[in-house]
Image (cartoon, rainbow, N blue to C red):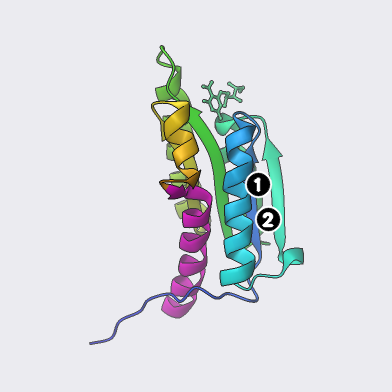
Amino acid sequence: MKVIEGVVPAPQAKVAIVIARFNSFINESLLSGAVDTLTRQGQVADDNITVVRVPGAVEIPIAAKRLAKSGKYDAIITLGTVIRGGTYHFELVSNECHKGLGHIMLEYDIPIAFGVLTTESIEQAVERAGTKAGNKGTEAALSALEMINVLKAIG
Ligand code: INI
């Protein structure tokens, strides 16, 4: 049996992170988790990490598309927080963001890690941004590192 799986260290990797400003007090914790994981576990050089800031989750896909199209990166990590309010807006923002990124990943053949929180409340978001339910930015960075290596291994 031949098994292909990715390891975490990717010392030569170039990674772009797209982060939304909306709900920035949560997103900055996701960014800390992602950068810490890329550098300490992934051994990615600080100079090989590019951070792109956009207004909100709706704008994440177009920035990710431009980065993917540039061919300069091995993976893209997306970070943001969409918190449900009383209206249909939550579905529009989170679905557009998720769907857009899925298309870009396949069209440009580049791993895009989805580190966008979609929660019912601010409390749930805080829990997933470095407190009791872990850090979604860390998880996204780990998945990006693994996918860089698994795609390299597949060839
Ligand atoms: N953007 C977010 O990243 N999270 C949200 O929860 C959110 N809500 O709830 O409205 C949000 N809206 C802004 C949106 O992403 C765009 O920036 C805006 O509509 C301008 O295009």
For image coordinates 46% across by 66% down, the residue present is 147
Residue 76 lies in quadrant: bottom right
Q: How many marks?
A: 2
Q: Position of residue 153 (x, y in %)?
A: 45, 79
Residue 144 shown in magenta: yes
Residue 33 lies in quadrant: bottom right
Q: Amino acid at mark 1?
A: Arg
Q: Could one spot residue 64 in this view of the protein?
A: no
Q: Which sits in the foreground, 48 or 152?
A: 48
Task: Check disc 1 and report its element: helix, strand or loop.
Answer: helix
* Quadrant of image for the N terminus: bottom left
Beta carbon at label 2 within 8 Å of ligand 1: no
> Magenta span covers which residues?
134-155
In space, the residues marked 1 and 2 are separated at their CA atoms by 6 Å
Q: Residue furthest left?
A: 1
Instruction: Name the residue beneath numbered marker 1.
Output: 66
Q: Position of residue 38 (x, y in %)?
A: 60, 64
Q: Pointer 2: residues within 10 angstroms few (<14), some, or many (20+)? A: few
Task: Check disc 2 and report its element: helix, strand or loop.
Answer: helix
Instruction: Name the residue beneath numbered marker 2.
Output: 70
For image coordinates 44% across by 17% down, the residue present is 85
User: Residues at badges 1 and 2 in contact (C-beta under 8 Å)?
Assistant: yes
Q: Which quarter is ligand 1 in?
A: top right
Query: Which mark is drawn over residue 95?
Result: none
